[in-house]
Amino acid sequence: MDYLNLPTAALHQWAIDLFLAMGSSQREAMLTADHLVGANLAGHDSHGIGMVPRYVLSWQVGELQLNQHATIVQDSGSMLTVDGGRGMGQAVTQEAMALAIERAAAHGVCVMGLRHAHHLGRVGHWAEQAVAAGMVSVHFVNAVSFPVVAPHGGSEARIVTNPFTVGIPVPGQAPILLDFATSAIAMGKVRVAHNKKLPLPPNSVLDNQGRPSQDPGVIFPAPGTARGALLPFAGHKGYALAMVCELLGAALTGGETTRPANLKMQHGIWNNMLAIVFDPARLGTADLFSAEVQEYVDWVRSARLAEGSEEILLPGEPEQRSRQARRESIPVDSETVAQLDEAALRVRQAQGTAPGPASALA
Ligand code: NAD
């Protein structure tokens, strides 16, 4: 596989400079770069720097709006509906989550619906924002873009990869972080496999005739050819969870569901999210909680290992390890680097200024 090792700090600065050149405020440019490079650091290249070319295209056609703020549209104290104004998801979601955390600190719990955000990236990032404030948070998210996931029992796409996420702070220990797409494979991982020309895992996609395939090209077909579909994870269970994400994350928050009438965008990806944020200390169990977690985790880890497995991990551990491994540099496949170079060129042509090619950072 062909890739370049890009120094983490230089890549972060490159992203800041690109968003500044597009017209983002310093704050927005910084939050977006932190988030995207943070996703690469966490090992989720699908939601990392490789999203930049799509954001640039979305901005150029007037879909991604820069420098928006999260606006409260409904407020009953512990329940909030917030509108993201199609703004940069990394900036408006940070504000929406800050509001939810503030309300959870005041009332013990906050149910916050965020609608009309542009792509809000790796949802685990938002759970981590809540966890850093000592809060548990649960996130039901829908993504609005061309449908890519077939419902269980169907062979045509009707859903996007709707992520579900839970962050649990554990005093004195690393937090537990569950954060995944409800498809058998995240769409961004299909893009990465397509760029790297690698096959997909079995049982993750169907071709446009509804037949099982491992070719990422069935999801990125030549113009004029019908697209295949990703499968939900765990059959009916993943599909059922994706449906709940769509209905709670979008239909209930006033956001749009992924159906033809709502799919007018060319390059944009909208996200809508229902977040339930609460202060676990209010349950009065804090003294027992850490010890109970430790005892339970020890018991779980004591299970005999499966053949070929070296250890039993906790949700959140792969991301912690990846951050250590990628502290200095991030491997980015050459196709993605070429797309980053092209994105910088587009911004330069549009704005007269932009950072140099990302490939020059290697
Ligand atoms: P994934 O399949 O890599 O699963 C990640 C989750 O599984 C994490 O919680 C991780 O800690 C846990 N995990 C991984 N290996 C483990 C192990 N061996 N033992 C225990 N736990 C383990 O994730 P994914 O489905 O590819 O999703 C990647 C990212 O994509 C997520 O951050 C998600 O939020 C994001 N996403 C965003 C959107 C959007 O519209 N914004 C859509 C889909 C996905």
Image (tube, grey):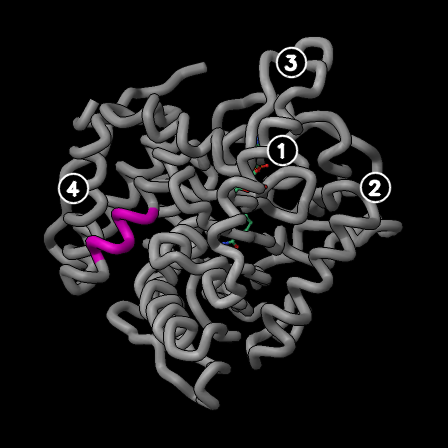
Above or below, comparing residue 134 to residue 38 in the picture: below
For label 4, count other residues whose C-alpha is less than 10 Å away and answer few (under 14), some (14-19) or many (20+). some
Q: Which residue is mark 3?
A: 309
Residue 47 point in image, percent of width and height: 44, 44
Kindly tell me whether mark 1's CB lies below 8 Å from ligand 1: no
**Which is nearer the eye, 23 or 32?**
32
Quadrant of the image where one finds ligand 1: top right
| Label located before the other in sequence (3 or 4) | 4
Mark 4 vs 1, N-terminal side: 4
Where is residue 150? Give x, y as percent: 76, 50
Query: What is the crowding at mark 3: few (fewer than 14 residues within 10 Å), some, or many (at least 20)?
Result: few
Query: Alpha-carbon distance for marks 3 and 4?
Result: 38 Å
Q: Is residue 307 magenta?
A: no
Q: Residue furthest top?
A: 308
Q: Residue furthest left?
A: 353
Q: Amino acid at mark 4?
A: Gln
| Residue at the (33%, 41%) spot, across then down | 38
Which residue is the site of mark 2?
210
Which residue in the protein does label 1 denote? 217
Q: Position of residue 197 (x, y in %)?
A: 54, 23
Tell me the amino acid under the disc marked 3: Ser
The circle on residue 13 is 4
Position of residue 268 in the picture relative to residue 292 (left or right):
left
**Amino acid type at mark 2:** Gly
The reply to whether the C-beta atoms of the residues labelled 4 and 1 are less than 8 Å apart is no
Image quarter hosting the N terminus: top left
Q: Is residue 192 left or right of residue 91?
A: right
Label 1 CA crowd tier, 10 Å (few <14, some 14–19, many 20+): many
Q: Nearer the viewer, residue 112 or 39?
A: 112
Whether residue 32 appears in magenta in the rendering, the answer is yes
User: What is the spatial separation of the Cα atoms under label 1 and label 2, in whole angstroms?
Assistant: 14 Å
